[in-house]
Amino acid sequence: MQLPDLRAIVTGGASGMGRAFTLELARAGATVTVADLDEDKMAAVVAEAEALPGSVRSQRVNVVEEAEVAAMIEESAAAMGGLNALINNAGIFRDGLLVKKDKATGELKKMSLSKWNAVIAVDLTGPFLCTREFAAKMIETGTTPSVVVNISSLARYGNPGQSNYSAAKAGLVADTKLWAQELARYGVRVGAVAPGFVDTPILQGMRPEVLENMLKAVPLRRVASPEEIFLAVRFILECDYFTGRCIDVDGGLRM
Ligand SMILES: NC(=O)c1ccc[n+]([C@@H]2O[C@H](COP(=O)([O-])OP(=O)(O)OC[C@H]3O[C@@H](n4cnc5c(N)ncnc54)[C@H](O)[C@@H]3O)[C@@H](O)[C@H]2O)c1
């Protein structure tokens, strides 16, 4: 698919990587809906894209709410004059060890069920709902080709302190494969990108010494820019022979 032909939804497009994906797509002439919870940040992205060749609109959605997702897909398709791409990028993390014993008091601290549920909801149920509604729309309208890009994470291999996030991001790659298998007959491709450390507000909030320590494990010794992650997203969008796989973009962290 050619980028100027895209009518794409980017979930979580108000910040970090989603913002960069939206602006890169608009720069290439695509039509984009930013679908996010944060209306102020969405408005800023829409304003920033005004001078670019493509066009960007915003749509408030909570990706964990079934009815909101269904309405967002319908309204976005109508407003953009069609729909043929979905980037499942919205995500959160709520880290904690499964169980931890306090050295001083001996007290056991457990990852709470609410932390588990919150991350599974946004990072796994969200993409499930968005992809289901997107695929239904593609089949209903006979739109082909079309493409879904799931933003996973290197945590898919299992990161201590991230039971919830690792499960969601690994589950998303498993679903990438099976959605690719189930949907190929309708002309829908599905791919995933698993970034390592990326320069977004999450990382910018980290203490420099913590970040430096984390980067010791990265052969390229630096974080990625969101635009570097976009190159993998772009490959999946453009390459009509790619489906069912995940591209790790991690500076060599997991070889
Ligand atoms: N930053 C990294 O180093 C990194 C690494 C690997 C993977 N990722 C993944 O990349 C994606 C983007 O990460 P980021 O660092 O740009 O994050 P970010 O926090 O900068 O942006 C996430 C966006 O998602 C939106 N969002 C959160 N919950 C939502 C919901 N329920 N419904 C709709 N929108 C919602 C937020 O409002 C925000 O605009 C996430 O899926 C994240 O897990 C990030």
Image (cartoon, helix red, strand yellow):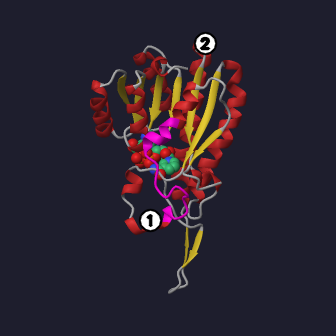
Are dots 1 and 2 in contact, CB under 8 Å?
Answer: no
Does the magenta run of residues contain 92?
A: no
Mark 1: amino acid: Glu
Image quadrant in which you'd find residue 136: top right
Judging by the rendered image, the residue that carries numbered circle 2 is 142
* Image quarter of the N terminus: top right
Q: Which residue is drawn at the image coordinates 50% and 36% (left, top)?
A: 231
Classify 25 as above or below 219.
above
Left or right, 191 with respect to 80, comes to right
Magenta segment boundaries in residue numbering: 214-231
What residue is rendered at 46% in x and 50% in y? 198
Q: Specify whether residue 57 is in view.
A: yes
Dot 1 corresponds to which residue?
Answer: 212
Mark 1, Cα crowd under 10 Å, few <14 / some 14-19 / many 20+, is: some
Report which quarter residue 205 is drawn in: bottom left
Q: Nearer the viewer, residue 26 or 124?
A: 26
The reply to whether the magenta stretch includes residue 229 is yes
In which quarter of the view is residue 140 placed?
A: top right
**Mark 1 or 2, nearer chain start:** 2
Q: Quadrant of ligand 1?
A: top left
